[in-house]
Amino acid sequence: MLDPRLFILNAEIGFNAGDMIVQLVMFVILLALITKFAWRPLMNVMQEREEHIATEIDSAEKNRQEAERLMKEAQDELKGTRANAQKIIDDARQTAKSEEADMIQAAKSEAERIKENARQEIEQEKERAVQALQEQVGTLSVQIASKVIEKELTVDEQEKLINEYLEKVGESK
Amino acid sequence: MDHGSPMIEDVFGISWLDFNQSNVLMTFVASVIVFLIAVIGSRNLQRKPTGFQNFMEWVVDFVKGMISSTMDWKTGRQFLPLAITLLMYIFIANILGIMFMVEYNGDLWWKSPTADPGVTLTLAVMVVALTHYFGVKLKGGKGYVKDFFSPIPILFPLKIVEEFANTLTLGMRLYGNIFAGEVLLALLVSLMASGALEAAAGFLPMLLWQGFKLFISGIQAFIFVMLAMVYMSHKVSHDH
């Protein structure tokens, strides 16, 4: 059934120098071509990718540090700002308090001044009124007196009498 | 099922220059396929890879892992193109014989080029020659020679034998695996061709064996490249 010669398949093939040369040359050519057209570009791309990834990682790390730094800065800034605001509020409170005291003081003294003025005015008015009254009383009493004693008194005696009377009035007051 | 080979003998009247046209053809086919895959895979390269580029980068990373498991990456990176090309070439060459075999005029034209000892040994010799070249280049002539006498000088003959043994095993392992696979495939095919009953009986084993051979193809390609890198690291890395 089976051809026994199958077992010596290719048996007549020994080492053919031609084959070997062809094989060697072919492989060297293949190696050269394939390296130039396929492996080099492929490896370059892979290399490039590796470098790309490496730089990306580096830059990511750098960005992270930068972000951290900025955040810290912002926090410090915020803290500073907060303290500043607190100071401003305190200052304002202080200022308001002193202002308030000043105002009260000013108002008090103003009131005092007004009171004083009023008192003085009252005094003056009173004096003026007293004076006016004195004059009126004088003339009035003269008129009365002149009406009463018109006939018995000379002008000189009358004058003297009035003055005496007026002095008495002034002392009694 | 009489397989012959499409030989051209004594080219240019040189008595030792024989060509097996099948090997020439299949070597060429494998090279073209590998080249196309690589070039199509690395077209339109983008920083954010899509589709085929992902696959190519996975291959590159895979080979990178293989190399860095044998030597430090700084010396190893220069072997990356060689290693990827070897891996893909051998893998493609291995699976070429799985899909089909083509006979024409009683000659076997389409098969795995790696099912030929000449081809695999050429690859092996090339790899070993490269290890010596890089050994001299990276360690200097003195360091290279010194390696043969360390750790103790008495090992020198063994080291010499080792070089030849490495070369031979590297090539023959690949050849043996692939060739055996193809022999079994041919057997199954001839079994299935001999009658309806046999065809039915042979269907499942055929399927299994093809799957297994695909697995073997990948494993052998991996082993070849791994060993190539191990030999390379023996030659280029400093005392470990």
Image (cartoon, rainbow, N blue to C red):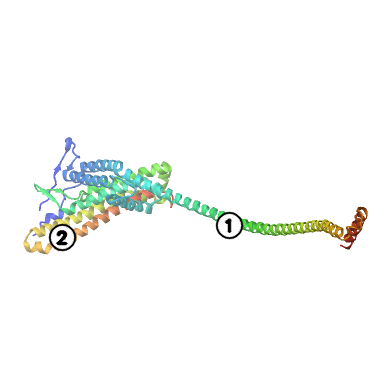
Q: Position of residue B208 (x, y in %)?
A: 18, 61
Residue B238 vs A144, above or below: the answer is: above
In the image, taking residue A70 as reference, residue B139 lies left or right, namely left
Q: Residue at x 36, y 45 (%)?
A: B78
Residue B116 vs B17, above or below: the answer is: below
Q: Position of residue B81 (x, y in %)?
A: 32, 46
Q: Can residue A69 be seen in this view?
A: yes
Q: Mark 1 lies on which chain?
A: A
What is the crowding at mark 1: few (fewer than 14 residues within 10 Å), some, or many (at least 20)? few
Q: What element carries label 2?
A: helix
Give the mark toward the camera: 1 or 2. 1
Give the residue type that dot 1 points to: Arg
Q: Is mark 1 on a helix, strand or loop?
A: helix
Nearer-the-camera pick, B78 or A89? A89
**CB under 8 Å between discs 1 and 2:** no
Report which residue position mark 2 lands on.
B206
Q: Residue furthest top?
A: B12
Q: Which residue is drawn at 18% across and 60% down?
A: B209
Name the quadrant containing residue A22: top left
What is the crowding at mark 2: few (fewer than 14 residues within 10 Å), some, or many (at least 20)? some
Q: Residue furthest left?
A: B195
Q: Which residue lies furthest to the front in this view?
A: A151
Nearer-the-camera pick, A82 or A96? A96
For residue B53, which numbered disc appears in the image?
Answer: none
Q: Position of residue B46 (x, y in %)?
A: 32, 46
Q: How far apart are marks 1 and 2 (CA)?
A: 86 Å
Give the residue type that dot 2 points to: Met
